[in-house]
């Protein structure tokens, strides 16, 4: 079955420490993967997509087909990174499948 | 620019009562439209999506239904609410075309409490 898994519901990291939010997927095809973020009192929005190979707000994510993972990373956490993060995957149609989300808290 | 509206923002309804949540999009034509439910620990669950007027795809069989009476209007309904329908409901839209649907734009959400 096609699935997106975020194993951590909660993650706390000290300011300045590295951040890694895990995302694994199960799909036999070539997926398109995304990270969405929801800051406090703001709308859910796209953070980055793997196809763009971009760095947004210091975050990067690499698609590892061998491990079927798409972990989100940032070398030095900032307080404004505290938010809810969702990994999402497109299985080749008009919809996205979201993971259960990880709430990231940056400790000052 | 494009905007997406949802109302009401919050709603408290008794069990067994009907439901109607509305979502409208401005500034774009022929969008794909989506209804999600966001629940703690369960993430973002796609309920319905629509690629055109009158075209509804249901993802999860349940007590809810959706309709798209106009191009930029998407309605989530129920004839009789259950306690388990409580949650935060999000509407989203995306453009058509290859890969365009991968960037979805979300509304502010409706907090529904069924008592």
Image (spheres, rainbow, N blue to C red):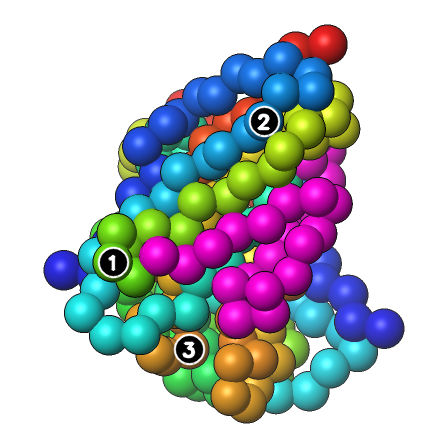
Q: Position of residue B106 (x, y in %)?
A: 63, 57
B2 over B105 or under it: above or below: below
Q: Which span of residues is magenta-colored?
A: A39-64
Tell me whether marks 2 and 1 sit on the same chain.
yes
| Closest to the observer, B34 or A35 | A35
Q: Secondary structure at mark 3?
A: loop
* 2 or 1: tag closer to the N-terminus: 2
Q: Position of residue B96 (x, y in %)?
A: 56, 86
Q: Are marks 1 and 3 in contact (CB under 8 Å)?
A: no
Identify the residue position indicated by label 1 in the image: A66
Does residue B11 appear left or right of residue B1 in this picture?
A: left
Please identify the quadrant where the C terminus of chain A is shown: top right
**x 34%, y 78%: residue:** A92
**x 61%, y 87%: residue:** B30
Identify the residue position indicated by label 3 in the image: A94
Query: In which chain is the residue bearing label 1?
Result: A
The residue positioned farthest toward the right in the image shown:
B1
| Closest to the observer, A102 or B33 | A102
């Amino acid at each position: 079955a096609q699935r997106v898994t975020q194993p951590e519901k909660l993650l706390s990291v000290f300011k300045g420490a590295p951040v890694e939010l895990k995302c694994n997927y199960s799909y036999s095809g070539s997926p398109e993967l995304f990270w969405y973020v929801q800051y406090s009192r703001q709308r859910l929005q796209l953070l980055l997509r793997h196809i763009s190979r971009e760095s947004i707000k210091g975050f990067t994510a690499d698609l590892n087909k061998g491990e079927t993972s798409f972990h989100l990373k940032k070398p030095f956490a900032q307080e404004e990174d505290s938010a809810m993060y969702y990994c999402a995957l497109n299985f080749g149609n008009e919809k996205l499948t979201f993971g259960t989300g990880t709430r990231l808290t940056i400790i000052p | 620019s494009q905007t997406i509206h949802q109302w009401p923002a919050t709603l408290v309804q008794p069990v067994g009562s009907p439901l109607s949540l509305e979502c409208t999009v401005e500034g774009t034509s022929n969008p794909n439209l989506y209804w999600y439910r966001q629940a703690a620990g369960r993430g973002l669950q796609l309920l319905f999506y629509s690629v055109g007027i009158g075209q509804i795809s249901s993802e999860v069989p349940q007590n809810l239904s959706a309709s798209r009476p106009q191009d930029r209007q998407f309605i989530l309904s129920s004839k009789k609410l259950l306690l388990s329908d409580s949650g935060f409901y999000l509407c989203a839209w995306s453009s058509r075309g290859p890969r365009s649907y991968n960037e979805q734009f979300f509304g502010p959400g409706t907090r529904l409490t069924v008592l």
